[in-house]
Amino acid sequence: MMHAYFSDDQLRHHGKTFIVAGEKKPIPEVPERAEILRGAVGRLGLDLHAPSDAGLAPIAAIHDAQYLNFLQTIHDEWQDVGGAEQVIPNIHPFDRTGPYPRHPAGKAGFHLGDTSCPVSPTTWHSAYASAQTAIAAARHVRDQGAKTAYALCRPPGHHASGNIAGGFCYLNNSAIAAEELRRKYDRVAILDVDLHHGNGTQHIFYDRSDVMTLSIHADPMDFYPFYWGHAEEAGAQDGLGFNHNQPLPLGSGDAVFLDALDRALARIDDFAADAVVIALGLDASRDDPFGGLTVSPDGFARIGEKIGTLSCPTVLVQEGGYVSETLAENLYQFISGFGATTKTNPI
Ligand SMILES: [Zn+2]
C-alpha cells in the first residue's frame, strides 16, 4: 500500500489574519485542513508514517541560509522591538540587491512577500516538519524503490522562493522533494495542479534544465499571484524551454483542466523525466472558498488517473486546498484514480 507521511508538529502553526480587499480576514490555511486530509488518508487505507528527521541540509539545498535563520529568529526579534503576536511586513524593497536590513521590520519586508505568511512562535516548527514530510516521501521513493508516496504537507510550499515566503508558504516542499530526487535521477519534473500558479517553484528552477517545472492554474491576469504564471514565461539561460505555464480562464472546469493536463503530461514525456513530483493542490475544486476554477470530485479522479499513467516514480506533495464540504472527497478521488492506473503496484 502507498506510504503517506505526516507529523503532528505540522499542526502547530496557525496564522491568524491577512489582508484581503483591504480588510483583515482569517487565514484559511488552518490546521483543520490537515486533519481533514488525514481523514481521507485513513479512508484510503494508506500506510501513514511520521517522517524521520533528515536535518536542515535537504532544506538548505533549496533555501538561503539567511532566510532559514530569519524564519527561526524573527519572531523573537520582532517581540524585542515591541512587535505584535505575529510578524507581518509593512514595507518591501524594490529589489533585494541593497544591504540586508538590521531592523526586524526591514527583515520582515525583505523575506515575507505578502501579508498571508505571518510568522508566529510555532511557524518554523510546522514549516520544518512539513518539509521533513516531503523529504521522507521523496526518500521512500528514491531509496526504497517505491513507485509512489504521498506527503501530507501543511503548511504548503509552492509560493515560497529560495528566500521569500508568500501565500501561506514558507518552505518549498515540492522543490525540496525534487532536489532530493535529483540526487538519484537525472531529470525530474514538478507538475503543479494547484489553483494558484506555483511561482516559488518556478523561480527556484527557472534557469535549470534538469528540473522541468509545469503549472496549470487560474489566469494570473485575474488571480493571485498576479505577477507570475503567464504562458510566455518559459525559463531562462539553461532553463529556457523547461518551464511551462498553462493559465486557465477563471471558472474553467473538468474538461478544460483535463485538456491542459494532457498537454503537460506530453511535455513530461518529451522531457523523458526519470521522476516526477506532483504539487497536489486541491483548491481548483468547484467547492473551494477561493472559487477560481470548478473541478468536480470526479474531475479529481480523472486527474489522478491521468497522472497515474506516468511510468516513472511519482511523489505526491500536498499544496493548497481549503476547508469545504468536498476537501476530503477530492483527495480521496484523486488518490483512488491515481492508484487505479499506477502501472507498478505501490509498495
Ligand atoms: Zn492554491
Image (spheres, grey):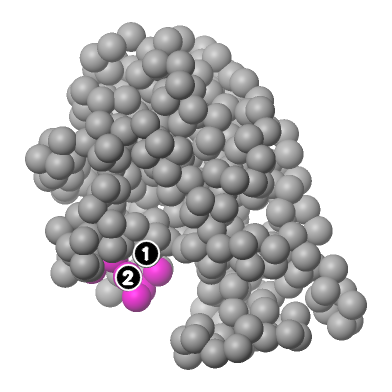
On-image quarter of the N terminus: top left
The secondary structure type at the circle numbered 1 is helix
Task: Locate residue 303 relative to residue 48 in the image: left or right.
Answer: left
Amino acid type at mark 1: His
Residue 310 vs residue 286, the one in the foreground:
310
Vertical side of 103 occupied by 326: above or below:
above
Amino acid type at mark 2: Trp
Residue occupied by mark 1: 203
Q: Which mark is residue 228?
A: 2
Tell me the residue at 58%/35% (across/down): 133
Q: Position of residue 58 (x, y in %)?
A: 55, 44
Tell me the residue at 76%/69% (across/down): 74
Q: Quadrant of residue 332?
A: top left
Q: Quadrant of residue 105?
A: bottom right
Front of the two marks 1 and 2: 1
Tags 1 and 2 touching, CB below 8 Å? yes
Vertical side of 270 occupied by 206: above or below:
below
Residue 159 vs residue 32, the one in the foreground:
159
Q: Position of residue 325 (x, y in %)?
A: 51, 38
Tell me the residue at 51%/83% (across/down): 96
In this view of the protein, can residue 226 be seen by the observer? yes
Q: Position of residue 56 (x, y in %)?
A: 64, 46
Residue 295 vs residue 95, the one in the foreground:
95
Range shown magenta: 225-230
In this view of the protein, can residue 289 be seen by the observer? no
Asked if the residue at label 1 sits under 8 Å from ligand 1, the reply is no
